[in-house]
């Protein structure tokens, strides 16, 4: 359903030069000495099926967020393509990209990213308002969505009146409300304490089973990745070092970097 086909993303003034170096097999370490150009992703390929949760791991700067932004059409790969439902994202018109972001893909970030001056209900309805300019939250039934994320009774609360875990529930509800089949989650639970974090993981798993969402989930936390992910991709300096089932990776870490991440 989502395919990354040989994606390379170079940031900087001279992507074609770097692309040629990559095609010649030059190491990242050598390329990164080339001033001003950074390898965001290098020859990344993997696939996700509908209803799958894929977790992405890797140290800071390894390309995790870059990968999500490419799925969302926020940035364009220097080489290679991402396809959704067998359609290459780069071939979509800007109107189609907008539709994709409104209806097919929802993002959930770290630190909630809620609107402070909107109450819970109006935070949740934000994507719906974008989808439909005549949307009226007074005529919308929020019960089911509030119930799904455990926020019944909190519709009138403002973000500052909620705990971090509850704010993250609002973020999740906002992503679910649009009905988008694909969720891109960038370290959504990393600012929560460990108990709340486990609650949110359980909530996500139960929602995913019920709603059959396709999810790319970025995390620094290996137990979290193992718990949530059907498959896992481990990135280092923009390259995939290992991918597969989490349990297989635990049994056979390919190198010291992966062993370090598993700790
Ligand atoms: N817009 C940009 N311009 C230049 N370089 C960028 C840009 N965005 C990302 N990079 C670089 O690309 C690399 C990958 O960045 P990315 O944000 O994807 O890492 P990450 O794995 O999400 O890191 P973190 O765990 O810290 O969030 C980094 O070296 C980063 O500095
Ligand atoms: Mg990031």
Image: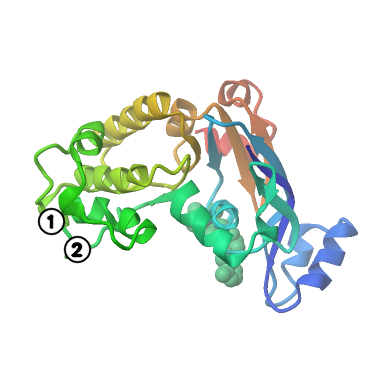
Residue 55 can be seen, yes or no: yes
Number of the label disc, if any, that sits on residue 116: 2
- Image region (quadrant) for ligand 1: bottom right
Q: Position of residue 62 (x, y in %)?
A: 59, 53
Q: Earlier in the sequence, mark 2 or mark 1?
A: 2
Q: Report the residue at 27% width, 57% height from top.
A: 135
Q: Nearer the viewer, residue 218 or 193?
A: 218
Q: Quadrant of residue 247?
A: top right
Q: Marks 2 and 1, Cα distance to the nearest angstrom?
A: 7 Å
Please rate how many residues cluster around mark 1, counting C-alpha atoms within 10 Å: few if below 14, some from 14 to 19, many from 20.
some
- Pinpoint residue 133: horizontal percent, then vertical percent: 32, 63
User: In the image, is 100 to the left or to the right of 3?
Assistant: left
**Are dots 2 and 1 in contact, CB under 8 Å?**
yes
| Residue 32 against residue 54 in the figure, above or below | below
Element under label 2?
A: loop
Q: Which of the numbered marks, if any, corresponds to residue 182?
A: none
Q: x, y (%) of residue 225?
A: 48, 33
Q: Is residue 256 above or below residue 35?
A: above
Residue 187: x, y in percent?
A: 42, 47
Residue at image location 26% in from the left, 42% down from the top: 169
Label disc, if present, on residue 158 of the rendered structure: 1
- Comparing 227 with 262, the one in front is 227
* Image quarter in which the N terminus is found: top right
Please count the marks in the image: 2
Element at label 1:
loop
Q: Is residue 5 left or right of residue 113?
A: right
The image shows residue 118, relative to residue 37, as above or below, that is above
Residue for point 71% across, 77% down: 35
For disc 1, does the CB lie below 8 Å from ligand 2? no
């Amino acid at each position: 359903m989502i395919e990354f086909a040989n994606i390379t993303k170079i940031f900087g003034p001279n992507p074609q030069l770097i692309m040629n170096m990559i095609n010649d097999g030059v190491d990242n370490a050598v390329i990164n000495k080339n001033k001003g150009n950074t390898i965001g992703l290098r020859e990344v390929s993997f696939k996700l099926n509908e209803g799958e949760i894929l977790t992405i791991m890797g140290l800071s700067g390894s390309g995790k967020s870059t990968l999500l932004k490419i799925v969302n059409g926020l940035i364009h790969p220097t080489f290679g393509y991402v396809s959704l439902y067998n359609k290459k994202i780069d071939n979509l018109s800007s109107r189609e990209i907008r539709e994709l972001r409104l209806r097919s893909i929802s993002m959930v970030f770290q630190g909630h990213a809620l609107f402070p001056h909107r109450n819970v209900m109006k935070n949740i309805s934000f994507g719906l308002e974008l989808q439909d300019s005549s949307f009226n939250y007074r005529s919308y039934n929020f019960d089911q969505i509030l119930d799904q994320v455990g926020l019944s009774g909190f519709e009138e609360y403002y973000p500052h009146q909620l705990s971090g875990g509850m704010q993250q529930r609002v973020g999740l509800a906002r992503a679910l409300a649009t009905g988008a089949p694909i969720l891109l989650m960038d370290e959504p639970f990393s600012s929560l304490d460990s108990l709340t974090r486990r609650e949110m993981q359980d909530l996500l798993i139960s929602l995913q089973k019920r709603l059959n969402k396709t999810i790319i989930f970025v995390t620094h936390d290996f137990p979290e990745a193992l718990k949530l992910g059907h498959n896992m991709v481990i990135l280092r300096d923009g390259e995939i070092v290992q991918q597969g089932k989490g349990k297989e990776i635990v049994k056979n870490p390919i190198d010291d970097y992966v062993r370090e991440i598993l700790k």
